[in-house]
Every structure is written in structure tokens, then in C-alpha cells.
Amino acid sequence: MKKYIYALCFAATLSGCDLNELPVDTASNQSVFGSEKGLELYSNSFYKILPSAEDVFLGDNTSDYVARTNVPTFIGANTYSAVDGSGWSWSNLRNINYFIENLHTSPVKPEIKDSYLALARFFRALFYFEKVKRFGDVPWVNKPLEMNDPQLYGGRDSRTLVMDSVLADIDFACAYLDRTKDESRTMITKDVALGYKSRICLHEGTFRKYHTNYGLTASATEWLQLAAEAAQQVMQNKQFSLYNEKGEALSYRELFISKKPVATEIMLAFACDAALKVTTAANRRYISPTYGDRPSLTRQFVNTYLNLDGTPFTDNSNYATTSFQDEVEGRDLRLKQTIRLGDYKRTNNGTPYAAAPDFLITFTGYQPIKWSFDESLPYDNESLNDNAISIMRYAEILLNYAEAKAELGTLTDQDWSTTIGALRQRAGITNGLASKPAKIDTYLQQKYFPTIADAALLEIRRERAIELALEGFRFDDLMRWKRGELLEAPFNGLYVQALNTPMDLNQDGVYDVRFYSGDKPAAMSGVVDIQVGSDKNYSLSKGTYGELSWNPGVRQWEDKKYLYPIPEKDRLENPALGQNPGW
């Protein structure tokens, strides 16, 4: 629980609100730096840089495979501008730099100072990684600025300078962090630092490779090699492994509903504790008909889940017209642990009951359950979830390693077996586990990555999307792969055989939903009626039958959106910042 013990008497007073504001220092230097306890207390304030629980479980609500209530402002048609811009906040950086600058005054042993310096530099690397992803070029500041410092109103530094500095910081953290184990899974350890290094270097390497307009493709290989090496080090350290104690049908889901982080696989988590009133609103966000975005997976994405024999579902000749109850049978077992399928149950006053996809909540029929941990919690109770929210899992490390090696052209069959093969084996898939594939899945290529001709790389991208679904990775992945166009992908849903015909989605003998056009039919108990038509948000691909489509409004991708704009108010205060192209 140390993650929640912030330096209450220091953090607020030593952190400025922005890059050009000077905070009032009211805590004494001696109380912070005079003892190891003071260093520990202060450094706990850095942890607020980590993603919040909602950053994780709502992170994919802006992605290509999640249909939602409204169009995200950022990808709407002319709905986002520099005036709407945000994120140009630097108070966390000043907090870190103040600590780094004054750490040398501490009387603690040099090796202890090095470890706290490593922690501070880890968080500075993480802070800047997020800034570069959002804005590209940003000012590199490695000291707390005073009011008369000319750097306050200077320009931005190049992406290459900033990322080289990020790499130096994360390397120092990996070398000098002294914490190698943490059973709570809420603290930064050497393996977590290495995991972040693999994440950062993979992002930067692929960004440079695919965003050729930056002229940085020559350096992409170096970053990809660093990503592979960092991930490999975590693997060789053998502190973590894939969790499979509940078998193929339950282990994956347990990672997301366990009240304590599953220590086998979870490397870093937002840990909840109901007794301390540290909880989240995961259930409310995912199962309330009146609250939030009502995120629903799209059929195009669900189509990418393999059959249990390892073959693509879309190789079936009739895949496009297969009913919901049939298309979810015999598939990668992660599918039934990610969305409501036939045997999914909730409880009412302690009594289990079959719960079909609920069209008062889902738009597509593919209703997520991944973070909804307590099936007895009512829809609209806010912040009752006390399941741990994972920030980094060992599964990501395997995916990072496999992708970096594939991008480098050095992926071996052994690499495949220990990464993608292991993940698929846990998901119940029986074939294609020992050696990398040679045959391209044309559906995956055509729908998602038409310029990728490497079958193994295509499969790694498939695996990453499925394994990490709804964990907040997808938007960043699309940005680094230069596939922003996918954010315009259709919000498509299940196949409807005919209008005015009630459907039993989970085959429990009870009808669940009925689609109609024109006048609403007479009500049926328990059945949700959905009106479709060309003038409605819902429509069917063939008019009176076909694939369901949800259209909340126009989504429009423009390449300028690979970077966010510098917020207008900050640019006006400091014109030297300039503006990102197109904004």
C-alpha cells in the first residue's frame, strides 16, 4: 500500500502548476533529505505519475475495436483544436527535479542515494515518455527552474534529444534500483524498470520505423534492439511467469478480477482496498445502462480471435453470416473471459442466473466483462470495485520481445514458442504453438495492416490486440504503427437474421433482444427492442437483415493527429513553443 502514502506535507508545496510557475517551498530541506525515511516519504509522491485505474480500464474506449456512446472529441469531424488542447503540465517534473537536485545534500549512504536517484530518474523517464508520445518535441528540463531562468520561455527540444535523455534515465534506473522484489506489486523494482524500458524502446523504435516523414528510420533498429534486450532480461530474471493456476478457461479472467494482484504475472498494479476506501468504478463503467461510454467490442475485432485449432475464424466460408450463438463457439478461450458468452452468469440476491449480452448496455452484442469482478454488484453503484487493476503484466513483456524481434527480422521458432506460443497455449489453442507461421491471414492483413507482408509480425499484432484488449494499449499502438485510419473502422455488431424476430443470444431458452423497423412491436417480457433504419443510429447491412451497425456520429482521422496540438493558452504565453504541423 506504499503507493498511496504520498508525501502529503511536501508534494503540494514543492510542485508548481506549470513550467513557468514557481512554487512556494514551505517544507524544510532537512526534513526531506536529512534521513532515508524523508527520502522514502518524498519519493512516494512520484507514484502519482503512474496511470490511474481508470486510465487503464477505460484507456481503450478511444480505439478502433471499441464502439461507444459518442464519438471521442479527438477523432470527431472538426471537433478538436488547439483551443481544446491539454496535457501541457509540468508540476510533476519540477517535483522530481527538485528531489534530484537536492539529493546530494543527504547524509545517507551513497548506495542508498543512488537507489533513490534511480527511482527519481525512472519517473522522469516515464514523465517525458508520455509527453513525447503526446506532443513530439518538448522542452528538456533537468533542473527546477527559477523565475528568472530564460529556459522558462525557451523553445522545444528535438524528439531525438529528449528520447536520448529518457533512455539515459531509464538505463540509470535499471542499473541502480535496489528493490528487486515487491510482493504488493505496487512499487517500482528492477524488473518493472526493465519492463518500462522495453515498452518505451519498442514504442520509439516502431514510431521511427513507420513514421518515415521524421527521417529517423536509420535509428529505429537501435531502439528495437534495446526493447528486445530489456524484455529478454525480464524473462531471464525468472521473477514472473504466465498465470495458469485456474486452467485455460478461468486463469486469464482471474488476472482482472482478483482482489490482490496475481503475483505470478502482474508486475505492477493499482491495488485496491475496500477497508481503506481505495476502490474503482469498473462495474459501473462497464455494466451501467446510464453511465459512461458503454464500451462494446466490434465484430471486426472479435473476428480476429482464432478457432481453438489455431485456424482463423474468418477462414470459415460462412463467417460473415454466422449467428452470435454459433460464432463464439470453439474460439480462443480468452473470448469467453473478455465478453459475455453462453455460460456467463451474474447473481441476484445470491442466486446465479444466466446473463446474456444486454442491449441496454452494449451497442454491438459483444459486451465486455474483463474488469467487472463482482457479478452481484448492481449496475449503478459507483466505486465499489476492489479488484486490482494491472498496469504491467508479464504477458506484455513477452509481446514486446516477440514484436521487437520480428521487427528486427531475427524472430526464431524458439522465440515464438516461448512468447506467442505460450500465450496461445494458455488460451486453449492447440496448434501453431511451436513455430512461427508462414501463411498470411488475408482478413487480418486487409482489415488492419495491408502494408505488412510478414506473417509472424501480423500474428504478433493480432496477439497483442487480443491479449491486452481493454488494458489501455491500443491507441498508442495505432499511433506508433501509423495506423490512425483504423480509428474510422466500423462500429459493427452481431449478425441479425431477420427483423421482428426475437433472439436468444446465450441459448438459455429466454429471448433477449429483437430488432425492428417502423412501428415498435408489442413488448415481450425481458426482451430489449432496438429500432433500426437508415435514419437511425442502428442499421442492418442488408436493410431488413445482416450485420448490425452502430453509428454515433462522424469519425474523421487526419495525420496531424499523430501528435496533439500545443494548447493554445500555453503557446500564447510562450510563442517560442511553436505549434505541431497541421494544428
Image (tube, grey):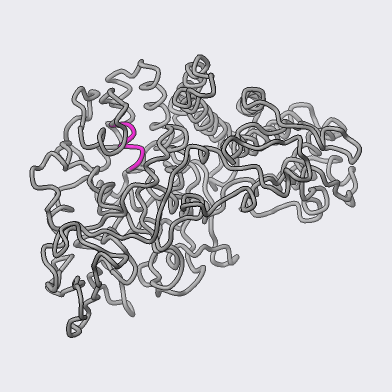
Quarter containing the C terminus:
top right
Q: Quadrant of residue 145?
A: top right
In the image, taking residue 497 as reference, residue 167 lies left or right, namely right
In the image, taking residue 386 as reference, residue 453 lies left or right, namely left
Question: Looking at the image, is 573 positioned above or below residue 526?
Answer: above
Q: Residue at x 19, y 73 (%)?
A: 516
In the orientation shown, which residue stands out farthest toward the left? 317
User: Tag count in the figure?
Assistant: 0
Q: Residue at x 61, y 42 (%)?
A: 565
Front residue of this view, candidates 366 and 554 = 554
Query: Where is residue 81 shown, x and y percent of the image?
Result: 59, 49
Residue 460 covered by magenta stretch: yes
Q: Residue at x 91, y 37 (%)?
A: 148
In the orientation shown, which residue stands out farthest toward the bottom? 522
Question: Looking at the image, is 74 positioned above or below residue 524?
Answer: above
Query: Where is residue 528 shown, x and y percent of the image?
Result: 25, 75
Residue 529 covered by magenta stretch: no
In the image, taking residue 221 as reference, residue 189 lies left or right, namely right
Magenta region, residue range: 459-465
